[in-house]
């Protein structure tokens, strides 16, 4: 996890000196974060470092602590234990200062539905006391393609446009770190693709992005994947690293009715998942010998070949390890 | 981050104003609520009710008695029903089916003719003194009318007994009705209506942000609690003034309220009173977990504010503890100020003793609200 040697400086506001993070240059550097809600420990000893300019994907089942971690990073929740810095500022003591330099996009649309697109952005510009707010709002609307919808009420936008507006609102003040909490939930493929293109554009300018998601294609677009379970980081690395480290074995069978074969092979020992993908039966497991045996006994009539495990197989495997979702 | 920024406050004010403007239901409520309440309360409390259910007990119906019953009916205050027995009368008045029982004694005709000035006993249900007040008072007028209308038989007898009316009404009530007049009620109503509408509007202000999820975004941005509070309160001060104007127009135009004092001073004082209610509403808003709770808090407040302020019952008649509680509440003081200003023409010096408690209450409430406004989601 070595930071890029020449991390491009983030677009900083004039009155806020650009921070080079801690000595390691990490934008996020937290150790052993804990958070309890009542008797339930939601985040349990989370240690995370994210270098400048990286797009880091947060993955994990519902309730694995993604949202709580993000809220602690931007000072909306006070951690019950642990310490760390965000943009070089202490996450407990300097929470108000962190807020100025962080763009946080909530999981639920949280702009005002009874205000128009431009009114919402005007409000944000005013609250961050941006110099020349009018020009800043006009600029960002042009850049994010919101100009045509400036006068539309936010509540009447479609899901994709709402997400785009929310992203616009949280980059308006030129933050150095973006925390995006499931920004594309319930948005169509095209809008998601466009949204991620925007994220990579911003990252290209030196913005650090931490984004939580449930979509595999989005996870694959992250430089690093951090997988959470039970409030802890289970595995992290690039998509290829994560797939390689888990060591899952996967086979594909094609031929006569795959549905029957799927039903039979699902019950065989060592088969963790048997998924029908159109005319193809896709099986995954950790033990090659057991999978071979399963194919021999239950996979008759199909033509089998070994394939590379997909990220989705890996996550389903990881989800299975932690038991049924809470 | 600066402790206070005019720039941020201005951005928030604009947002609040746009939101109020785009909420047609609230706008309608703002106008309709005070008018409706003033008219309903005003007329319900101040009206001079007619057509009250009245039972008549007659031992032996005769000409005079029929004349008297007709006169009662013609006054418009009484809806006459003949009763067959004392027991029926007792039951009906106990159950509230009758407000009056007119009891004509046996041998009434002869008594009148003899010039004995017999008494007609009228039992009234005193539980609601304002309801029967005017009707009871009207009896006095009826005696004179009847003296003129009674048949000539009486006039022949009159020569024998020239002094005094031919008969008397004896009214029997359980207790003395309060001397509540229309003029006393309307100024109190101004305060009560204003309290109800402004408290209700702001109580929902912050809980609504929390429930819609917009609070999370607002908290993630660099805003100060005091800025959020002020921005929430400001549009409603304007709305409160609009309501005062509507109430005054209705009160003067329809309920014939006189204005003896300075109207400028009245508006200044009511501004402080509105602010005190808004501050309380905001405080509830920060303390409550959701809109439902906030609304319940407001409703639990309105009742004692109304009952202990001297609006419903005379303040001096309340026990000591209730008066102490009443002195804390801004509604009590506002009511005294408005009554004094409108009816007695009081000036600044007269209202000062009631002005500072409102200011103190407002200050304390705002302090509590700022203290409990949560800057995190914990």
Image (cartoon, coloured by chain):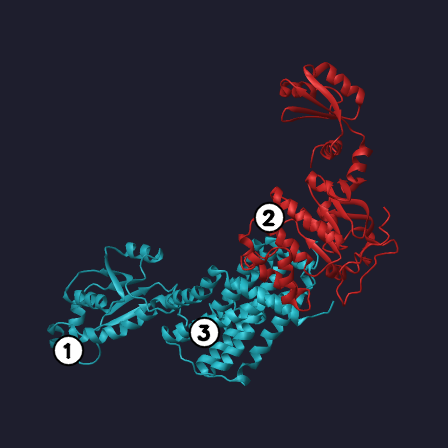
Which dot, 2 or 3, sits closer to the camera? 2
Q: Name the subunit of mark 3.
A: B
For chain A, the rendered hue is red
Q: CA distance from mark 3 to mark 1?
A: 59 Å
User: What is the chain identity of the residue bearing mark 1?
Assistant: B
User: Residue A127, percent across and down?
Assistant: 66, 65
Q: Which one of the lettered chains is coloured cyan?
A: B
Q: Which residue is mark 2?
A: A160
Q: Secondary structure at mark 3?
A: helix
Tell me the distance, in whole angstroms, between the alpha carbons under discs 2 and 3.
46 Å
Quadrant occupied by the C terminus of chain A: top right
- The earlier-in-sequence mark between 3 and 1 is 1
| Disc number placed over residue B158 in the picture, else none | 1
Location of residue B38 in the rendering, given as x and y in whole percent from the top left corner:
41, 68
| Spatial separation of the CA atoms under disc 1 and disc 2 | 99 Å
Residue B248 occupies quadrant: bottom left
Front: mark 3 or 1: 3
Which residue carries the number 3 mark?
A: B245
Is disc 2 in contact with disc 3, using a CB cutoff of under 8 Å?
no
Give the crowd class for mark 3: few <14, some 14-19, many >=20 residues within 10 Å.
Answer: some
- State whether discs 1 and 2 lie on one chain: no
């Amino acid at each position: 996890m070595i930071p890029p040697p020449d991390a491009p400086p983030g677009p900083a506001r004039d009155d806020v000196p650009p921070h080079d993070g801690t000595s390691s240059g990490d934008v996020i550097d937290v150790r052993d974060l804990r958070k309890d809600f009542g008797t339930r420990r939601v985040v349990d000893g989370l240690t995370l470092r994210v270098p400048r300019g990286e797009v880091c994907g947060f993955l994990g089942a519902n309730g694995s602590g993604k949202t709580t971690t993000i809220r602690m990073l931007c000072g909306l929740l006070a951690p019950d234990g642990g310490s760390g810095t965000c943009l070089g500022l202490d996450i407990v003591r300097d929470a108000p200062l962190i807020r100025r330099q962080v763009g946080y996009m909530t999981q639920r649309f949280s702009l005002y539905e009874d205000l128009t697109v431009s009114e919402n952005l005007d409000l944000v510009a005013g609250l961050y006391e941006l110099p020349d707010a009018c020009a800043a709002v006009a600029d960002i609307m042009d850049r994010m393609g919101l100009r045509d919808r400036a006068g539309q009420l936010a509540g009447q936008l479609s899901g994709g446009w709402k997400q785009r507006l929310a992203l616009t609102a949280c980059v308006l003040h030129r933050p150095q770190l973006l925390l995006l909490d499931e920004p594309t939930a319930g948005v169509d493929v095209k809008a998601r693709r466009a949204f991620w293109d925007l994220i990579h554009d911003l990252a290209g300018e030196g913005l650090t992005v931490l984004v939580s998601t449930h979509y595999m294609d989005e996870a694959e677009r992250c430089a690093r994947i951090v997988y959470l379970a039970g409030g802890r980081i289970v595995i992290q690395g690039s998509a290829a690293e994560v797939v390689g480290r888990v060591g899952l074995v996967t086979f594909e069978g094609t031929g006569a009715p795959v549905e029957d074969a799927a039903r039979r092979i699902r019950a065989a020992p060592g088969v963790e998942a048997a998924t029908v993908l159109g005319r193809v039966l896709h099986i995954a497991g950790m033990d090659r010998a057991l999978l071979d045996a399963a194919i021999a006994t239950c996979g008759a009539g199909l033509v089998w070949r070994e394939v590379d495990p997909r990220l989705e197989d890996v996550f389903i495997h990881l989800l299975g390890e932690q038991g049924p979702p809470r | 981050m600066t402790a206070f920024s005019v720039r941020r406050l201005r951005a928030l004010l604009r947002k609040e104003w746009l939101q109020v403007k785009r909420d047609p239901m609230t706008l309608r409520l703002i106008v309709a609520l005070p008018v409706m309440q003033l008219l309903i309360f005003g007329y319900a409390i101040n009206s001079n009710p007619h057509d009250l259910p009245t039972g008549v007990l007659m031992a032996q119906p005769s000409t005079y008695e029929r004349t008297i019953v007709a006169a009662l009916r013609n006054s418009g205050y009484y809806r006459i029903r003949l009763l067959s027995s004392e027991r029926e009368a007792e039951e009906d008045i106990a159950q509230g089916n009758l407000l009056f029982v007119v009891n004509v004694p046996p041998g009434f005709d002869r008594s009148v003719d003899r010039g004995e000035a017999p008494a007609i006993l009228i039992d009234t249900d005193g539980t609601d003194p304002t309801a029967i007040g005017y009707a009871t008072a009207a009896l006095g007028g009826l005696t004179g009318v009847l003296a003129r209308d009674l048949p000539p038989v009486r006039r022949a007898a009159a020569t024998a007994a020239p002094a005094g009316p031919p008969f008397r009404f004896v009214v029997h009530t359980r207790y003395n009705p309060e001397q509540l007049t229309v003029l006393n009620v309307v100024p109190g109503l101004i305060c009560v209506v204003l309290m109800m509408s402004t408290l209700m509007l702001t109580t929902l202000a912050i809980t609504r942000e929390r429930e819609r999820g917009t609070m999370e975004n607002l908290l993630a941005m660099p805003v100060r609690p005091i800025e959020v509070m002020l921005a929430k309160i400001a549009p409603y001060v304007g709305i409160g003034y609009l309501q005062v104007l509507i109430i005054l127009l209705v009160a003067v135009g329809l309920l014939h309220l006189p204005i003896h004092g300075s109207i400028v001073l009245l508006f200044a004082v009511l501004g402080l009173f509105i602010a005190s209610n808004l501050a309380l509403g905001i405080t509830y808003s920060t303390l409550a977990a959701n809109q439902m709770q906030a609304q319940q808090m407001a409703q639990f407040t309105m009742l004692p504010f109304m009952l202990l302020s001297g609006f419903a019952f005379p303040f001096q008649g309340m026990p000591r503890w209730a008066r102490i509680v009443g002195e804390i509440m801004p509604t009590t003081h506002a009511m005294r100020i408005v009554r004094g200003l409108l009816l007695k023409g009081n000036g600044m010096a007269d209202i000062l003793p009631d002005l500072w408690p409102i200011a103190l209450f407002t200050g304390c409430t705002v302090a509590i609200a700022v203290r409990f406004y949560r800057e995190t989601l914990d």
